[in-house]
Image (cartoon, coloured by chain):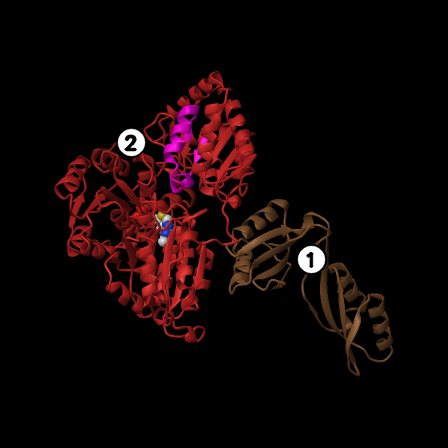
């Protein structure tokens, strides 16, 4: 099963490599990892998407908690949450495809943030499957370049991850 | 008071009441060694290889409960120390390792003797630090000691660039530390302990299985009291030997790969298992699917939540410090009205005694060739069962664990998790420094001993009266045993050729050497070594049977009750 694990950790040099090192050392899978400081600059918040059986995910959270710099860990997927990912896509936009591109971007609520004679850069946020669907709709032939941030997520309502 | 970084390091070690620092100097730690030179509150022990410094500090800790301290220089000093650090990490031994680093301005430039110490050691330390500002030095060392010994213990490394050890700062040693991200659970959950007690009292075929956590938590006394009150059978892991007196009748021997028949059978067939400070590892449980074929309830007490339900699903997890949880369990037991099921327990013991009657550790006596088991039996007799025994890794290690009966904790010192050949001799040094009055013997093999043989020189310098019991079978015995059993007798590279004359070698280092070839000489030679040469290091080279194998044995992938016994062959 796919899980979204949120981690609050000390914003210290080396903390990221402790987490990523743990995943490789114990052969846990990482689909995506994002990290940035929080409103409290002494803390970073990391979101890891991992796939594993319940037993493996339980070990992952326990092992993460064991890292000295990790302050809190929650498995967001255990309850209601929202997840988002940001993607920038550079597409070929010439001739009749130029109009079509704009239309598809609108349908997916994407924004064109850079324009040249032959290309657009489209910005899109959403969950994984929305971004995947967008790419599929455009088709490989027209995609010049993509970059995705990886998933970040947050619990709904009263579920708050804070120290 | 304003001090240099080097002086701060020394003052911190003094504040921590460190007695010994095991180390080896080099360029990046020169300021620290210089500051050390000017003090005499603790002693520095100069080893001959950094691996030995860490092993010695490690065994100092294992045999004393105090934090061991090692100090090495950057680059090769660190890489040499890694084997020692990983060894301590696998067995959860509290160490503080101080390493020199190239000056901060040189870091990342491939400077002379630079290595990414924090990166190289990250997977084999509980935590590590690179000190980038002298202001942080004292608090970092304070944290290092705190982390090393609290919670599940382990090695903590502090990497100090050379310039930092020469910068000045006002010194004040912090009285305490608290870290918001680190709060190990000490007390067990009362409700869980209650559930556990109920299961124990309802058990028909109970079993207690304990590991290194009991030793680390100094809970042997509490464990013994509880188990005696319950009247249950108990087994110890290789790391847990001495946690319960081996000569007591409730002790059924070590379990696992080379455990006794009765211990493994009882473990497999029990209906309630109380696991304490042990982690169901592969060398203990063998095949987990086979283990799970029998229905049983498992209670697991451990300070590390990640050890619980890692390899085997547990019914009643109790996270907490073993000593504290045992206290609470004992209190609840004392207050309980219910008693354990005496009739069921009697029947269970009858079954266990039948297993015990197989006498799985018996071996064929030999009047011509020294049997390795005999050497350990004699060692046990001659030392009155009261020595600190360190060991290397191989068959000799298993025989020592099987035939030397440890009645007290911290007497059996071996590399259980990493299985590091070369551990034994430096470990004996560390154990001696922690227990100068104790008899310390190192049980080793002719291959293992050569992995840290240079320490004979350290032993001479500090006049360490260690007794080396070399079970010399001219083979990488444990490797040969596997090749015999699973690789069609093809002894690929397991014959130990071109052996040195160990007597001459010992003498060359200024020690006493003995060469023993006949079974009838084993005891008298030992008497001589342990009495006549009490205050000297004696290297006893026992020429032992080359074909002896360790039994019982669970073959790779097999289950606990699928042992191969000596009698089967
Ligand atoms: C550093 C290291 N390298 C390799 C091994 C693999 N190994 C395990 S036991 C063993 C043989 C040990 O031989 P010896 O010390 O003579 O002991 P014996 O088994 O003969 O008693 C080897 C090579 C190890 N445990 N440690």
Q: Quadrant of the C terminus of chain B?
A: top left
Task: Say which quarter of the image contains residue A153.
Answer: bottom right
Count of numbered badges drawn on the protein? 2
Q: Position of residue B282 (x, y in %)?
A: 47, 42
Q: Which residue is mark 2?
A: B364
Callout 1: chain: A
Residue B70 shows in the view: yes
- Residue drawn at (63%, 45%), measured in percent from left and top? A54
Callout 2: chain: B
Q: Mark 2 vs mark 1: tell me if same chain.
A: no
B229 in the magenta segment: yes
Q: Position of residue A104 (x, y in %)?
A: 84, 69
- Residue drawn at (40%, 41%), measured in percent from left and top? B217
* Residue B210, above or below B39: above
Q: Which residue is mark 1?
A: A153
On residue A142, which mark appears? Answer: none
* Residue B187, above or below A125: above
Q: Residues within 10 Å of mark 1 (few under 14, many from 20)?
A: many
Q: Position of residue B367 (x, y in %)?
A: 21, 33
Range of the magenta residues?
A: B208-234
Tag in front: 2 or 1: 1
Say what secondary structure mark 2 lies in.
Answer: loop
From the viewer's perspective, tell me whether residue B368 is left or right of residue B132: left
Of A67 and B173, which appears nearest the observer?
Answer: B173
Chain appearing in brown on the rendered image: A
Chain appearing in red on the rendered image: B
Outermost residue to the front: B1
Q: Residues within 10 Å of mark 2 (few under 14, many from 20)?
A: few
Of B496 and B492, which appears nearest the observer?
Answer: B496
Q: Position of residue B242 (x, y in %)?
A: 34, 36
From the viewer's perspective, tell me whether residue B16 is left or right of residue B274: left
């Amino acid at each position: 099963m796919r899980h979204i694990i949120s981690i609050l950790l000390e914003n210290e040099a080396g903390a990221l490599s402790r987490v990523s090192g743990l995943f490789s050392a114990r052969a846990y899978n990482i689909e995506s990892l994002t990290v940035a400081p929080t409103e409290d600059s002494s803390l970073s918040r990391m979101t890891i998407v991992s796939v594993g059986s319940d037993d493996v995910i339980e070990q992952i959270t326990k092992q993460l908690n064991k890292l000295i710099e990790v302050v809190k860990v929650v498995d967001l997927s255990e309850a209601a949450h929202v997840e988002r990912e940001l993607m920038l896509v550079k597409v070929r936009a010439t001739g009749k495809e130029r109009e079509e591109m704009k239309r598809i971007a609108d349908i997916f609520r994407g924004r064109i943030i850079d324009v040249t004679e032959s290309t657009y850069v489209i910005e899109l946020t959403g969950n994984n499957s929305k971004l995947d669907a967008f790419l599929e709709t455009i088709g490989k032939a027209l995609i010049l370049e993509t970059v995705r941030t990886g998933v970040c997520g947050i619990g709904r309502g009263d579920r708050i991850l804070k120290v | 008071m304003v001090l240099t970084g080097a002086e701060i390091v020394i003052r911190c070690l003094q504040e921590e009441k460190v007695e010994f620092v095991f180390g080896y100097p080099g360029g990046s730690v020169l300021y620290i060694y210089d500051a050390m030179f000017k003090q005499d509150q603790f002693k520095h022990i100069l080893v001959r290889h950094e691996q030995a410094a860490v092993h010695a500090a490690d065994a100092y800790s294992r045999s004393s409960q105090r934090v061991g301290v090692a100090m090495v220089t950057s680059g090769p000093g660190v890489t040499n120390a890694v084997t020692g650090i990983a060894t301590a990490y696998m067995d959860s031994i509290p160490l503080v390792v101080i390493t020199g680093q190239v000056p901060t301005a040189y870091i990342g430039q491939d400077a002379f003797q630079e290595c990414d110490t924090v990166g190289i050691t990250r997977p084999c330390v509980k935590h590590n630090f690179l000190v980038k500002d002298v202001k942080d030095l004292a608090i970092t060392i304070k944290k290092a000691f705190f982390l090393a010994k609290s919670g599940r213990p382990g090695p903590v490394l502090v990497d100090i660039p050379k310039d930092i050890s020469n910068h000045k700062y006002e010194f004040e040693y912090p009285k305490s530390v608290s870290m918001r991200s680190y709060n190990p659970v000490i007390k067990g959950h009362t409700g869980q302990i209650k559930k556990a007690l109920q299961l124990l009292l309802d058990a028909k075929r109970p079993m207690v299985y304990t590991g290194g956590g009991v030793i680390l938590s100094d809970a042997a006394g509490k464990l013994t009291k509880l188990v005696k009150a319950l009247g249950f059978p108990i087994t110890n892991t290789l790391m847990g030997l001495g946690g319960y007196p081996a000569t007591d009748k409730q002790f059924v021997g070590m379990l696992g790969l080379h455990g006794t028949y009765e211990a493994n059978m009882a473990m497999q067939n029990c209906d309630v298992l109380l696991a304490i400070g042990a982690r169901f590892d592969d060398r203990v449980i063998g095949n987990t699917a086979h283990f799970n074929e029998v229905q049983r309830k498992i209670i697991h007490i451990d300070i590390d939540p990640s050890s619980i339900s890692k390899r085997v699903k547990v019914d009643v997890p109790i996270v907490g410090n073993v000593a504290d949880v045992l206290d609470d369990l004992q209190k609840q037991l004392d207050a309980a009205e219910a008693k354990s099921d005496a009739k069921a327990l009697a029947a269970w013991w009858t079954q266990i005694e039948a297993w015990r009657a197989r006498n799985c550790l018996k071996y064929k006596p030999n009047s011509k060739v020294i049997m390795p088991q005999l050497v350990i039996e004699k060692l046990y007799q001659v030392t009155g069962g009261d020595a600190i025994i360190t060991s290397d890794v191989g068959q000799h290690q298993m025989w020592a664990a099987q035939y030397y009966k440890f009645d007290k904790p911290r007497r059996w010192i071996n590399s259980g998790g990493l299985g590091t050949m070369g551990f034994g001799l430096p470990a004996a040094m560390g154990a001696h420094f922690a227990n100068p009055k104790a008899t310390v013997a190192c049980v080793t093999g002719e291959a293992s001993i050569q992995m840290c043989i240079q320490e004979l020189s350290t032993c001479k310098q500090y006049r360490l009266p260690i007794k080396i019991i070399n079970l010399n079978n001219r083979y990488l015995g444990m490797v040969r045993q596997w090749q015999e059993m699973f690789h069609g007798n093809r002894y690929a590279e397991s014959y130990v050729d071109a052996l040195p004359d160990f007597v001459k070698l010992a003498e060359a280092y200024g020690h006493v050497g003995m060469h023993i070839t006949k079974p009838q000489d084993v005891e008298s030679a030992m008497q001589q070594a342990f009495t006549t040469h009490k205050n000297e290091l004696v290297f006893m080279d026992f020429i032992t049977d080359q074909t002896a194998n360790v039994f019982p044995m669970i073959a790779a992938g097999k289950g606990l009750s699928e042992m191969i016994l000596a009698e089967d062959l």
